[in-house]
Amino acid sequence: MTFHEDIESIREKIESSIKQYGYAPEHNINHFLFTSESRQKPIFISWPDGTGLMAHKEEKEWYTFSEPVAPPNLRAKRVIEFTQFILDKPSIKKVVIESRVKTRKEILDTLPPTLKALSINYTLNWPIMNMEKFDPQLPGSHFKSLRNAKNKFYRDYSVVMKEANEVSEKDLHEVVEIWIKNRTYLDMPHSQIFHNMINGDFKGTQSARAMMVNGKSVGFNAGWPIPNSDQYYGAVGIFDYTLKDLGALLYLEDLEWIKNAGYKTADMGGVEKGGPLNFKNQFLPESWYKTFIFSIVKR
């Protein structure tokens, strides 16, 4: 087990690991770097067999990022090996884990007696869209209000999609700031992720598109293909709340792009229950899965 602080110096090694064992939507080295906050240091932990784990280091705690880049039989094992090593350091009080249901169960079943898993802090629900079944025309009674909103929106405004890196960074940063200020959901998104993405020229995305309404940027979508799958990750959808139904219409634009790109399914990102999940559920995802965020400490 080797800890790497200079991520760029081993980029090729990480990309090779993801190419071999990647499967989760956030198994993306650039996204991993963008999510690192100012108080954190991104660290990649590698094993001789090519498996790995992404993590963010803070002064007194560590956070794993997504699931281990490893085959199913090694995922829980890698988390435990990493956690044991980290918690042997007196200055570290806890390791915060994000894992899927199966991985968490295996962690709990094999956790050594010196460690203790605390109760779940919160749960993310990840909707999966069947893009072969999704119809951009939004037929049927369920989509009537959304269909009417879409027709009115495109009738009333001049709407153009542009490559996000062709739009003023200042304008995109402003969209993020307005979004975070006006967001009414109780979850606490970290706007720095999106500022980092803009500053990084959306590196690591397959597509990043800004919605221009009457010549002004009002939102943007971005995402990438999930490793070793035929699935796309609709990772980012940020908008400035200035127009009625803007969030839903930006989400629809993303779904239409994903379908036209030929993807069979799309992972539309993990959110907590309540408003965020209700919003995504109106588009009728085919299935959902969960990830749990919880901490492990020494007994």
Image: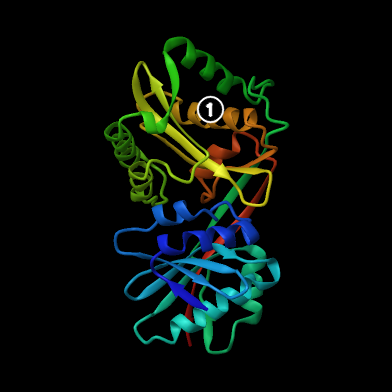
Mark 1 — residue? 253
Q: Is residue 231 left or right of residue 10?
A: right
Looking at the rendered structure, the kind of residue marked 1 is: Glu
- Residue beneath the point at 52% across and 84% down: 115
Residue at the right extreme of this rendering: 133
**Vertical placement of 101 versus 61: above or below?**
above
**Vertical placement of 59 versus 186: above or below?**
below
In which quadrant of the rendered view does residue 281 lie? Answer: top right
Q: Nearer the viewer, residue 185 or 234?
A: 234
Q: Helix, strand or loop at disc 1?
A: helix
Q: Nearer the viewer, residue 116 or 163?
A: 163
Report x, y in % for residue 264.
70, 37
Q: Which colour scheme appears in the figure?
A: rainbow
Q: Is residue 256 left or right of residue 85?
A: right
Residue at the top extreme of this rendering: 155
Would you call the spot at circle 1 few (<14 residues within 10 Å), some (14-19), or many (20 or more)?
Answer: some
- Residue beneath the point at 30% across and 36% down: 178
| Count of labels in the image | 1
- Residue beneath the point at 66% across and 36% down: 263
In which quadrant of the rendered view does residue 24 lie? Answer: bottom right
Report x, y in % for residue 153.
47, 16
Report x, y in % for residue 144.
61, 20
**Vertical placement of 22 versus 221: above or below?**
below
Q: Is residue 294 left or right of residue 20?
A: left
